[in-house]
Structure formats: structure tokens, C-alpha cells
Image: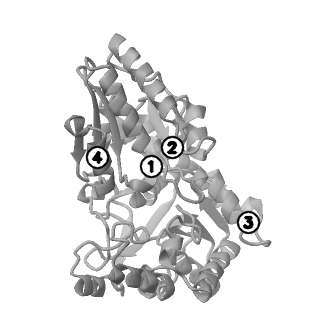
Amino acid sequence: MHLLVITYYWPPSGGAGVQRTLKFVKHLPSFGVQCTVITVDPAQGAYPVLDESLAAEIPAAVRVIRTGTSEPFGSYKKLTGRQQIPYGGFANESRTSLQQRFFKFVRGNVFIPDPRRGWNAHALRAVAALLQAGEQFDAVLTSSPPHSTQLIGLALKKRYGLRWLADLRDPWTDIYYSKELNQTAPARWLDAWYERQVLEQADEVLVTSPDTKRLLLGKSAKLTDAKFHVLPNGYDESDFREPSAPPPDQLLITHTGTISEIYHIELFLAACGECRRRHPNVNLRLRFVGKVSAGVQALIQDHELSACTELVPFVPHEESVRYLLRATVLLMAIPDVAHNFGILPGKVFEYLAANKPIICVGPVGSDADTLLEECGAGRAFPYVAYGDMLDYLESLVAAWQLNPNLDLPALNHSRYSRRALTEKLTKLIRRS
């Protein structure tokens, strides 16, 4: 089998977005699927973060074709004087300046479905050249965000009739920052029309959570349940070869990834502060690995946790895994946004693989909460459940005083290994 993979995010791009496609491509050859990857030239592409170490994950037999692109981010940097590109609906930009409101409006109403659509023509030319040279592909997999990548798959389906698997890592028109873009009615209609076209024309639609499947399935009466497949993110067993090493002298709660005010961990931080006051003899500490917003840093200070909190900037993926293994307890949070019941972050599976107790701040009954309970790894606490969070922290303190290693017994999570999930993908690729 020969699979054509089209993805914008690819090493040296870092962050969560690149992991899913990279791990699929890493494991597909062992199931008899040869991969050709078409992606953007990193010298021209716009990546929020870089992780050069991920290049080592690409199998030598995988052909990677990098193309040029035509995107507005260079002009954006010149006009604003900013070096960092906007991402997540300008979540990393000020929400108050007139300039940023203008750029949000342009983003939402001119660049539909997103500014990276300028890459599409370059990618399509690369595919056309391969087909004209006599190359044959059994299927095409397009991965998004950026959801404009799905329009490449749509074009290939219409022009060449290629079998097409659309992999949507996040919702499209229902993404949490959609309201921030101030779209006009015509822009919203066009964005939704693109979304429906992709969902209706794709041979298979892959999503990462049951709730996202329910959300997308309701987009058109033409859609059938059989077309949708929940293929969650996962963990790569090869990333967890080092032994667990929780610190013997501190109860260390670690969070990896981005954290901002929309995650509403203020009451969790308040509970941590109170727990430290009640148990001064226990060295309870916090560690945040990745981007921590100024608002969350202020909350840490407000709850008198600065002295016991370590902030570690973005690190390569392999180092991020080491931080998980060196923790006592792991913290994750689900953003307090619309449709957050279907948010199932890729890192939750790596948290599971680390075999640590997991504290989740987010909606009870969500896909993330269900997963944690199913695997016996933890539970979700509502954003306002200060008392419950404090009680749980105190139970951890009591357990830690008896044994500073709170690692859980072997969890029931093997079906979420990247290899097991890739085997499921292989069956979808071969499906006719």
C-alpha cells in the first residue's frame, strides 16, 4: 500500500500538532504501508514552536517533499513589529488593542478557512507532478488544523478520484476561538460550506474524541455514522524507556504544555496554597513546563506559590516526557470553552503512560474525564470544586507521607499506544 500524507505541521515544527501525523508515519511501514509526505518548506512555513529533535522519528524509507508557500505572516510581522506569529485565534496576542482587533477581523473574514490556505496551491502542484510522473497512491490522508489542508484533499478527490481520509484533530467552525474572529454572516456561511463539503466528500473522517464525532456528524443530513472513526491521540512506547523517578523529598505536581486563563485553574492553585499552609512539613511543589500566560503567573503569585513553583520554557518532546517521569502527580486542565466535553488533549495519553495520578481540572463526564476513570488514572474536578480539590490534595499528602512514590500500578492503556492506533488506521486505509 502507498499512502500520500499531506500535513502542514511536520518536523522541525514542534508542539502537539505535529505528533499525531508523525507517529502514524513512523509506525505505518511496519504494517506494510509506504508513505510519501507532502509538507511545507520550514524556511517558508509559519510554526509557533520548533523541535529539531523530532526529525529523528522520521523513518529513513519515508519520502518527504517540501514545497513553497504563500502566506501573510511575513507581512503581519512587518506591520506589527512582532516576531511571534499569531496562533489559536490570536490567543497569544493582546485582545484589547485596536490593531489586534483589526487583524482578527481580517483573519476571520479574508483568510477562510485560515491564513495557511496559501500553501494549498503549492501542495497541489507537488501532487500533480507525482501523478504525472506515473506515481500511484492507494489513499490520501490530510491532517488538520490548519483546516485549509482539508481543501487539498477535497481538490484531489474531485480531480483524480483518489480515496481520501480526512483527519481532523480539532473541530472546525466550532473551534473554541471562532467567536474571537468576528466573522460576518457571509464569512461564517463560506467557512461552514467548506466544512460540509469536506465532511460529505471524504471517504472516511477521523476524529480524536467521541464528542467531536457527535459534533461533526450533525453538520449535514448526508453524513452517516459509518463514515466517522474515533481514532484518539496516543503515546509512543519508545518515548517511555526511561524509568520513573519521582523526587523522594517533594510532592511535585507537574503540568506540561500551554496554560492560560481560559483553563481556570485559579481554585486549584488556591487549594494548593491552603494545602501547603495546613501541611508545612510537606514539600509540595508545582512545575509548569511550556508556555504559562502572564495571567496564570499572576495567579501563582496571588496564592503565594511563587517560591514553590518552577516555570520551565518550551522544551523538546523527549525532554517533556522526562519531566512527566520525574513528577509525583500530573496536572492537566481542559479549557473552559464551548464544546470542551470533546477536548481530549494528546498529552493525556502520555500522562497515562507515565503511570502517575492525574488531577484534571475540567468538566465532569467529558471525554477526558471518562478516559481517566476508564483507565483508573484519576478524575476531573469542576473548575469551581475548591473543596473537592483540597480534599484530594490532602489525600495525596497523606499517601505521600507514607511513601513518596505515588506511581500507579500498570494502567489499562495499551490500546492507546501509537502502534495500536496506527494498526487501526491501516485497516481504514485498506478499507474499500
The residue under label 1 is which amino acid type?
A: His
Q: Which of disc 4 and disc 2 is earlier in sequence?
A: 4
Q: Give the CA separation, mark 1 to mark 4.
A: 17 Å
According to the image, label 3 marks what residue? Answer: 218
Residue at disc 4, secondary structure: strand
Say whether residue 271 is left or right of residue 32.
Answer: left
Q: Which of disc 4 and disc 1 is earlier in sequence?
A: 1
Q: Which of disc 1 and disc 2 is earlier in sequence?
A: 1
Q: Position of residue 78 (x, y in %)?
A: 23, 86
Say whether residue 275 is left or right of residue 217.
Answer: left
Residue at disc 2, secondary structure: loop
Closer-to-camera residue (16/254):
254
Q: Give the CA separation, mark 2 to mark 3.
A: 28 Å
Closer-to-camera residue (331/351):
331
Q: Which mark is residue 383?
A: 2
Q: Which of disc 3 and disc 1 is earlier in sequence?
A: 3
Q: Which mark is residue 289?
A: 4
The N terminus, quarter of image: bottom right
The residue under label 4 is which amino acid type?
A: Val
Q: Nearer the viewer, mark 1 or mark 4?
A: 1
